[in-house]
Image: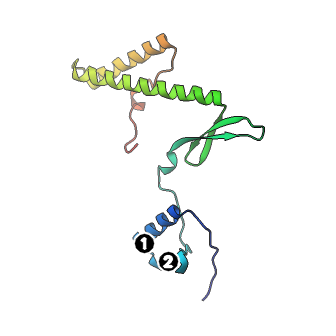
Amino acid sequence: MTYTYAILQISPEAHREIRDALAEAGYQHAFHDDNVIDMHGIALQPRPGEDSVLWHQSGVNAEGEPFVQLLLGMRVIAQQSTEQAREHALAMLEAAEASEQDAFLMDFGQKFCGMSLQQAAALVLEFRGWRKETTAKRGGPTSTRDWVMPAGQ
């Protein structure tokens, strides 16, 4: 029996990743001459979590106006003016600083003040309230169940 297939050219990195995954799964029969991989009956699916990379890219529209896109994986989730992007970047820096302050208080409260985890968490909540009132900056989550980053992140 003969059949035909369309050949789509992809990046060498993608080709190598697909070839290696198929070889590891025992699909050597999918490899043809001229570095072609016959994908008949084989479906592709992204690995869980790999589409969760948050990144940004610059752009310019047809009128010559600059903008910044925020992407999650390959999906555009926001488009911002350069002013909005700068405000967002500053907010990210402030959040990074606040998270380090929160981590310091949790650690200091437990290790040097003998607080339990719950007592140190209460101290952080109080500090976040004070920080919000005195700096007018938004605080982090107010529920301690929202504080934990999922494993592997």
Query: Which color scheme did the rendering employ for the protein?
Result: rainbow
Q: Secondary structure at mark 1?
A: helix
How packed is label 1: few (under 14 Cα within 10 Å), some, or many (20 or more)? some
Percent of width and height locating residue 83? 64, 27
Q: Earlier in the sequence, mark 1 or mark 2?
A: 1
Q: Residue furthest front?
A: 64
What residue is at 52 percent from the left and 25 percent from the top?
A: 91
Q: Quadrant of the C terminus?
A: top left
Splitting the image into 4 quarters, where does residue 149 fall? top left
41 relative to 129 in the view: left or right: right
Q: Amino acid at mark 1?
A: Ala
State whether residue 38 is above or below residue 57. Answer: below
For disc 2, the marked residue is: 31
In the image: residue 81, left or right of residue 86? right
Q: Amino acid at mark 2?
A: Phe
User: Mark 1 to mark 2: distance in Å?
Assistant: 9 Å
Residue 79 vertical placement versus 19 (above, below): above
Number of residues whose C-alpha sits closer than 10 Å to that of mark 2, classed few (under 14), some (14–19) or many (20 or more): some
Q: Dot 1 corresponds to which residue?
A: 23
Labelled pair 1, 2 in contact (Cβ < 8 Å): yes
Q: Position of residue 23 (x, y in %)?
A: 42, 72
Q: Residue lying furthest bottom in this view?
A: 1
**Residue in the image at 42% along x and 23% along y:** 98
